[in-house]
Image (spheres, helix red, strand yellow):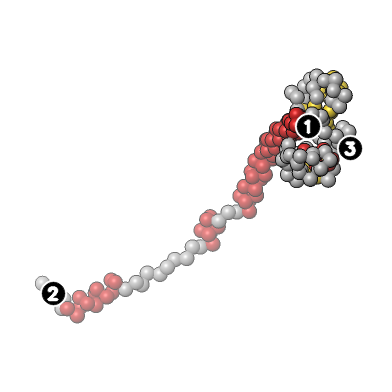
């Protein structure tokens, strides 16, 4: 039996350990199978577009619902502030617009700088500058969340007969009619969503 000498063993070991395997690069066909084709990319984009179109009405409805809730809270806050003013001064505040929560009324309720309408410098309501979807004050007065020109309406019982004339609506989108309400203060806004008219008030 022949036994290879040490030199032969070394050569055999070096032969088996040498990295002489060639690295295979993927062919053009293999690369095309791993990547997206143009058709597949267009299909993905189309699916995303369909999903977005389905979500948009739901998102719009949620945003409108949030605006209506904010408008309701603001109308109630304004009415509460006016009632607080009446309790403090024994009379209702004045507003130059007569039927709107104008800048004069905002100054009286929200500021300590109105020495005529609010000589004690009491803050009956806090309000920030108007922002879309959030409402707030601007140069015209207190605007609702739906638009910077949509100033809240107000009815004050300046004759102290415990009656004010305000709008009423049986159901959203229904006809708005005027009626007498047994209150000193009423604040409201009217928002038109496409063709549907919505009354948002402080008393319901």
Q: Is residue 5 above or below residue 80?
A: below
Helix, strand, or loop for circle 3?
A: loop
Location of mark 2 (residue): 3
Helix, strand, or loop for circle 1?
A: helix
Q: Earlier in the sequence, mark 3 or mark 1?
A: 1
Q: Mark 2 to mark 3: distance in Å?
A: 118 Å
Q: Is residue 151 above or below residue 14?
A: above
Q: Position of residue 175 (x, y in %)?
A: 84, 23
Q: Position of residue 118 (x, y in %)?
A: 79, 39
Marks 1,2: beta carbons within 8 A = no
Residue 63 falls in which quadrant of the image? top right
Q: Kindly identify the residue that appears in the image at 81 percent across and 43 percent down.
A: 114
Count of numbered circles in the view = 3
Q: Is residue 144 above or below residue 198?
A: below
Location of mark 1 (residue): 89
Q: Mark 3 to mark 1: distance in Å?
A: 19 Å
Along the viewing direction, whichever of 68 and 87 lies nearer the viewer = 87
Location of mark 3 (residue): 96
Q: Mark 1 to mark 2: distance in Å?
A: 120 Å
């Amino acid at each position: 039996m022949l036994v290879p000498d040490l030199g032969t063993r070394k050569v055999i070991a070096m032969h088996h350990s040498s990295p002489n395997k060639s690295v295979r690069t993927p062919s053009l066909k293999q690369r095309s199978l791993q990547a997206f084709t143009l058709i597949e990319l267009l299909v993905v984009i189309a699916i995303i577009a369909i999903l977005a179109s389905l979500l948009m009405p739901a998102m719009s409805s949620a945003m409108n619902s949030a605006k209506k809730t904010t408008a309701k809270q603001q109308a109630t806050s304004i009415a509460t502030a006016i009632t607080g003013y009446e309790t403090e001064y024994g009379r209702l505040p004045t507003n130059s617009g007569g039927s709107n929560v104008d800048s004069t009324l905002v100054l009286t309720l929200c500021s300590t700088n109105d020495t005529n309408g609010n000589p004690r410098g009491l803050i009956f309501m806090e309000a920030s500058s108007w922002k879309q979807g959030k409402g707030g004050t601007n140069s015209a007065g207190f605007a609702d969340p739906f638009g910077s020109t949509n100033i809240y309406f107000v009815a004050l019982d300046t004759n102290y007969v415990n009656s004010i004339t305000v709008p009423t609506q049986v159901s959203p989108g229904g006809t708005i009619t005027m009626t007498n309400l047994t209150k000193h203060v009423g604040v409201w806004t009217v928002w038109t969503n496409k063709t549907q008219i919505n009354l948002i008030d402080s008393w319901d």
